[in-house]
Image (cartoon, helix red, strand yellow):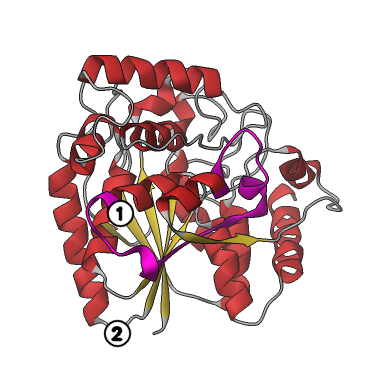
């Protein structure tokens, strides 16, 4: 087996802060988003809730892109529970059920080291299985805020994206500054200690992806948007050579003027691929709105498209398959 797609699920209490995440119709429903995303990849609809995850305005989860790419290219998927409120109702590897805490009030992830070590074991086992490339996606509501906090703690002036066209950067800044004050740190204050940054400000998805990436010594495609910049920054801070790593995202993340994807990737020193998907001519408003800045990325959409393109399919093929899946969903 040459490539394996890993979907790492994580939750953080940060997603319950009103206005910070639209990866669910309400803040409370963000608890269900990661397992529902995973289930939708295997079934016609999730088992844990009776609908696919949507934004408050009703835009479909990016899992629909990952599912479309997978149906075309038929790549294997392994679901990993990094730390969630609820377990997905599909076969999965359990790393932890620890949810990231609200870092304004307490350290976000005191168990970061333990999670990394467990995930590292998984990476080592995948290495032994003969897999040459891991493509690691994620589903973590609120994760762009924890990622931005990590970047700032490590000295990168990065701005992460949002699943909303109105990126709540002012709210993120306020939340992160409260976390820094609680932890007694300043911008760049944990540059020499990335694990402490994870403990104070991170989430279980970040810790799991870092651990798997340390354990697996082949090529790693970090399939996500600006959250994977934080993973790359942590790995670099731990002395890892980033030449075997790449971030695969979507053009919506790269073109997001409220974020700093390309600039921050260059500062960290990691190459990237952007899936050239275009929903502007879709018959469905929920998909056309991706072109207005809704959703953008998640559930490894860019990395799944990368695998489909490597298998000989075009981004247009992926878009057509997404349309087909969406038509099935709404009927």
Residue at point 59%, 50% (across, down)? 62
User: What residue is pinned by disc 1?
Assistant: 236
Residue 103: name its quadrant: top left
Residue at point 43%, 48% (across, down)? 229
**Residue 115: in sight, yes or no?**
yes
Residue at point 33%, 46% (across, down)? 205
Q: Is residue 61 magenta?
A: no
- Between 109 and 258, the one nearer to me in the picture: 258
Dot 1 crowding, Cα within 10 Å, few <14, some 14–19, many 20+: some
Image quadrant in which the N terminus is located: bottom left
**Whole-percent x, y for residue 234 in the image:** 30, 48
**Residue 87: in sight, yes or no?**
no
- Callout 2: helix, strand or loop? loop
- Callout 1: helix, strand or loop? helix
Give the answer, above or below, for where 161 lies relative to 114.
Answer: above
Residue 249: name its quadrant: bottom right
Residue 130: which disc?
A: 2
- Between 304 and 193, the one nearer to me in the picture: 193
Q: CA distance from mark 1 to mark 2?
A: 25 Å
Residue 291: which disc?
A: none
What range is drawn magenta here?
235-262
């Amino acid at each position: 087996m040459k490539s394996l797609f890993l979907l790492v699920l994580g939750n953080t209490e940060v997603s319950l802060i009103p206005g910070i995440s639209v990866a669910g119709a309400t803040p409370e429903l963000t608890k269900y988003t990661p397992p529902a995303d995973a289930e939708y990849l295997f079934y016609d609809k999730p088992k844990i809730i009776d609908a696919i995850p949507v934004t408050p305005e009703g835009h479909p989860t990016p899992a629909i892109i990952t599912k479309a790419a997978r149906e075309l290219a038929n790549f294997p998927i392994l679901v990993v529970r990094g730390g969630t409120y609820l377990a997905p109702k599909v076969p999965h590897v359990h790393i932890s059920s620890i949810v990231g805490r609200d870092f304004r009030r307490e350290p976000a992830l005191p168990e970061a080291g333990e999670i990394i070590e467990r995930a590292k074991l998984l990476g080592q086992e995948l290495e032994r299985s003969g897999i040459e490339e891991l493509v690691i996606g994620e589903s973590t509501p609120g994760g762009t805020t924890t990622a931005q906090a990590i970047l700032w703690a490590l000295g990168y002036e990065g701005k992460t994206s949002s699943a909303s066209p109105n990126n709540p950067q002012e709210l993120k800044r306020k939340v992160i500054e409260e976390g820094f004050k609680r932890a007694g740190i300043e911008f760049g204050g944990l540059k020499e200690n990335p694990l402490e940054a994870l403990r104070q400000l991170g989430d279980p998805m970040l810790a799991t992806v870092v651990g798997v990436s340390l354990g697996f010594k082949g090529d790693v495609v970090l399939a996500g948007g600006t959250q994977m910049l934080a993973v790359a920054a942590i790995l670099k801070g731990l002395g890892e050579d980033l030449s075997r790593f790449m971030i695969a995202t979507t053009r919506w993340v790269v073109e997001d003027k409220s974020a700093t994807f390309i600039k921050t990737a260059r500062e960290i020193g990691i190459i990237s691929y952007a899936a050239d998907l275009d929903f502007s001519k879709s018959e469905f408003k929920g998909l056309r709105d991706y072109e207005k800045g809704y959703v953008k990325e998640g559930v490894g959409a860019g990395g799944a498209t990368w695998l489909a393109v490597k298998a000989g399919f075009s981004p247009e093929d992926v878009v057509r398959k997404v349309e087909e899946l969406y038509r099935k969903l709404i009927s």
